[in-house]
Image: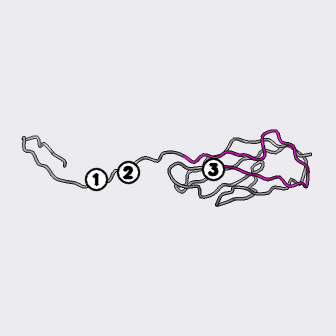
C-alpha cells in the first residue's frame, strides 16, 4: 500500500502492484583448460581448444574460441571443445569467450602457445 500526504494535509492511500526484479547475479565465468599457457605445438598437428563455462543466474549459450584474434569455432553446448590445426610456426594467443542467455560476454585468461 502506498500513502501520499498532500501539502494541505490530506492523506490518500492506494494499493499499487509492484514488480520487483532482482539484479543479475553476475556475468558468466569461463576458463580455458586446453591448451595451457606455455604449451608447445607442432605445425599440422591438431590442438584441442577446450574450456569450462558456467553462469550462476542463467545459462551459457555459446563459447567462442579465437587464436591470435581469429575466430576458430563456436560451441553452443557442453563440452566446449573445438579443434585447431596450426598451419605455420609462431607464437599464438588463445582465448575462449563465453556468452550467457542475457547476452553478457566474458573472455578467459589468454594462453600463449608456441608452434614449431
Q: Is residue 19 magenta?
A: no
Where does residue 32 sit, x and y in percent of width and height? 71, 46
Name the residue beneath numbered marker 3: 53
Kindly identify the residue that appears in the image at 9 percent across and 45 percent down.
11
Where does residue 105 sit, x and y in percent of width and height? 59, 50
Q: Secondary structure at mark 1?
A: loop
Where does residue 91 sit, x and y in percent of width and height? 85, 43
From the viewer's perspective, tell me whether residue 45 is left or right of residue 3.
Answer: right
Q: Secondary structure at mark 2?
A: loop
Question: CB of mark 3 within 8 Å of CB of mark 2?
Answer: no
Distance from Cα at disc 1 to Cα at disc 3? 35 Å
Indicate which disc, 1 or 3, sits on the residue closer to the N terminus: 1
Magenta segment: 27-52
Which label sits on residue 18?
1
Distance from Cα at disc 3 to Cα at disc 2? 25 Å
Give the foreground label among 1 and 3: 3
From the viewer's perspective, tell me whether residue 96 is left or right of residue 42.
Answer: left
Kindly identify the residue that appears in the image at 11 percent across and 48 percent down.
12
Where does residue 113 sit, x and y in percent of width and height? 82, 43
From the viewer's perspective, tell me whether residue 30 is left or right of residue 95.
Answer: left
Name the residue beneath numbered marker 2: 21
- As drawn, the residue found furthest toward the front would be 79
Q: How did the renderer colour the structure?
A: one colour
Mark 1: give few (<14), some (14-19) or many (20+) Cα within 10 Å. few
Kindly identify the residue that appears in the image at 91 percent across and 49 percent down.
42
Name the residue nearer the viewer: 44 or 51.
51
Q: Secondary structure at mark 3?
A: strand
Give the foreground label among 3 and 2: 3
Which label sits on residue 94?
none
Indicate which disc, 3 or 2, sits on the residue closer to the N terminus: 2
Question: CB of mark 1 within 8 Å of CB of mark 3?
Answer: no
Amino acid at each position: 500500500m502506498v500513502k501520499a500526504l498532500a501539502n494541505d494535509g490530506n492523506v490518500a492511500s492506494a494499493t499499487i502492484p509492484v514488480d520487483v526484479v532482482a539484479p543479475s547475479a553476475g556475468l558468466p565465468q569461463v576458463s580455458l583448460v586446453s591448451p595451457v599457457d606455455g604449451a608447445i605445438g607442432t605445425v599440422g598437428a591438431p590442438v584441442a581448444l577446450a574450456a569450462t563455462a558456467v553462469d550462476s543466474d542463467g545459462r551459457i549459450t555459446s563459447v567462442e574460441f579465437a587464436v591470435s584474434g581469429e575466430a576458430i569455432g563456436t560451441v553452443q553446448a557442453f563440452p566446449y571443445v573445438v579443434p585447431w590445426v596450426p598451419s605455420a610456426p609462431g607464437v599464438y594467443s588463445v582465448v575462449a569467450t563465453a556468452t550467457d542467455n542475457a547476452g553478457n560476454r566474458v573472455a578467459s585468461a589468454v594462453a600463449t602457445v608456441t608452434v614449431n
